[in-house]
């Protein structure tokens, strides 16, 4: 198993020939462990209301210029039907931390998706109390995504001001999610101001130790109007220590995630496609990823889920992006996955 030292050395590697070897090895390990199929998860962004004030995020509370929305249940079901029609196996529901998306609201929606489409359901709703996570699981939710963002406690607390309710505990929630029977996913942003090479290497080693079923990562993209974008120089480390937030470093992290966790489902995330609209998704799929998450959020809400600028998906509607995806997979010679696309190492408790 790759240790944190070796991981750090790879993250610092700049020789194109050596990097080509890393990417080829990640591609080989991907093919050997999860095959060539690319699983498609349709993404619906339920709400951009948020009680948190994460320094990097464009939907943090208190951004007065941002109009807030909450989707209607019927609109979610519509997205689920579209996903089913396109042969996508999973619907991912993501949102800001919005208490008004109550458990009963969510339970009703999950039960309707299950009854009407049979899709696998992934939740990405931030931190929720244990009893709520249990109820959502009982309603039929299959997976939960909760990025720990950084395992460096000091950096974590600097960029995540605590809400009144108390301490945040993203890392502590991951084993609980597994115990509840969820497939558990986590991940990080690459190149957050203040993130050192050593700390990112520790994050990646941790993906292996946590035996994550899903790993989501992508470059940090500054969103003007957020403290981390507007005052980046206060947070950044000296050159040589600070991880860059470019796609190449992101791809190194992606490839290394595949090497430490061969059987995980790993998406080519939207952040890569945003920074490199022409090739971001394809390169992700060629450097360790086996999942894509096209955005199905109704167009009138798209631009309001503004966690970072110019999200790739906000330019194309669901039907156009389905066609683009089909073409890209054909060009790559990778079949679209069928079925739910569970992680092979998942065991129901
Ligand atoms: N409220 C949910 C969903 C957050 S958005 C939660 O807290 O889990 C999903 C992910 O987008 C976050 O986990 C974070 O890693 C990423 N993200 C947020 N702001 C970003 C930015 N400016 N650049 C890149 N990724 C960002």
Image (cartoon, grey):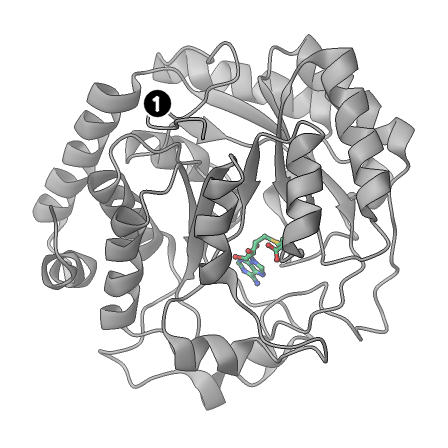
Residue occupying the point 47% across, 13% down: 336
Give the crowd class for mark 1: few <14, some 14-19, many >=20 residues within 10 Å: few
Between 69 and 339, which is closer to the camera in this rendering? 339
Q: Is residue 73 above or below residue 159?
A: above
Ligand 1 positioned in quadrant: bottom right
- The quadrant of the rendering that contains the C terminus is top left
Q: Quadrant of residue 191?
A: bottom left
Residue occupying the point 65% across, 77% down: 166
Q: Position of residue 295 (x, y in %)?
A: 66, 34
Residue occupying the point 38% across, 15% down: 37
Q: Is residue 232 visible?
A: yes
Does the Cβ of the disc 1 residue fall within 8 Å of ligand 1? no
Q: Position of residue 325 (x, y in %)?
A: 54, 21
Q: Which residue is mark 1?
A: 344
Between 94 and 317, which is closer to the camera in this rendering? 94
Tally the numbered discs.
Answer: 1
Q: Secondary structure at mark 1?
A: loop
Q: Quadrant of residue 53?
A: bottom right
Between 101 and 348, which is closer to the camera in this rendering? 348
Q: Is residue 274 above or below residue 116?
A: below
Q: Is residue 48 above or below residue 52?
A: above
Left or right side of 261 for 91: right
Q: Position of residue 179 (x, y in %)?
A: 47, 42
Left or right side of 147 for 225: right
Q: Farthest bottom residue?
A: 234
Between 57 and 309, which is closer to the camera in this rendering? 57
Residue occupying the point 70% across, 70% down: 52
Q: Is residue 91 above or below residue 253?
A: above
Q: Is residue 93 visible?
A: no
Q: Position of residue 153 (x, y in %)?
A: 40, 77
């Amino acid at each position: 198993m790759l240790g944190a030292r070796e991981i750090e050395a790879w993250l610092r590697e700049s020789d194109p020939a050596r990097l080509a070897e890393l990417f080829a090895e990640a591609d080989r390990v991907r093919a050997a462990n999860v095959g060539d199929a690319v699983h498609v998860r349709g993404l619906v962004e339920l709400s951009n209301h948020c009680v948190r004030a994460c320094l990097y995020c464009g939907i943090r509370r208190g951004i007065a210029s941002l109009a807030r929305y909450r989707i209607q249940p019927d609109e979610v079901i519509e997205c689920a039907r579209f996903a089913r029609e396109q042969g996508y196996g999973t619907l991912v529901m993501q949102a800001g931390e919005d208490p008004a998306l109550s458990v009963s609201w969510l339970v009703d929606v999950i039960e309707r998706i299950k009854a009407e489409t049979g899709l696998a359901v992934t939740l990405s709703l931030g931190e929720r109390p244990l009893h709520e996570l249990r109820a959502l699981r009982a309603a039929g939710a299959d997976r939960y995504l909760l990025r720990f963002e950084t395992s460096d406690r000091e950096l974590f607390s600097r960029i995540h001001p605590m809400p009144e309710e108390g301490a945040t505990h993203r890392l502590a929630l991951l084993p609980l999610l597994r115990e509840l029977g969820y497939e558990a996913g986590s991940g990080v942003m690459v190149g957050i101001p203040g993130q050192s090479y050593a700390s990112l290497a520790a994050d990646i080693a941790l993906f292996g130790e946590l035996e994550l079923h899903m790993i989501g990562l992508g470059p940090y993209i500054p969103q003007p109007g957020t403290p981390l974008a507007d005052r980046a120089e206060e947070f950044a480390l000296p050159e040589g220590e600070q991880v860059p937030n470019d796609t190449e470093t992101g791809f190194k992290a992606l490839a290394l995630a595949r090497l430490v966790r061969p059987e995980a489902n790993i998406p080519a995330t939207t952040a890569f496609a945003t920074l490199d609209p022409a090739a971001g998704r394809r390169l992700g799929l060629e450097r360790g990823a086996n999942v894509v998450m096209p955005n199905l959020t109704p167009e009138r809400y798209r631009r309001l889920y503004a966690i970072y600028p110019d999200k790739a998906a906000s330019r194309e509607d669901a039907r156009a992006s389905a066609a683009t995806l089909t073409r890209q997979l054909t060009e790559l010679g990778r079949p679209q996955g069928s079925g739910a696309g569970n992680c092979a190492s998942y065991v129901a408790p």
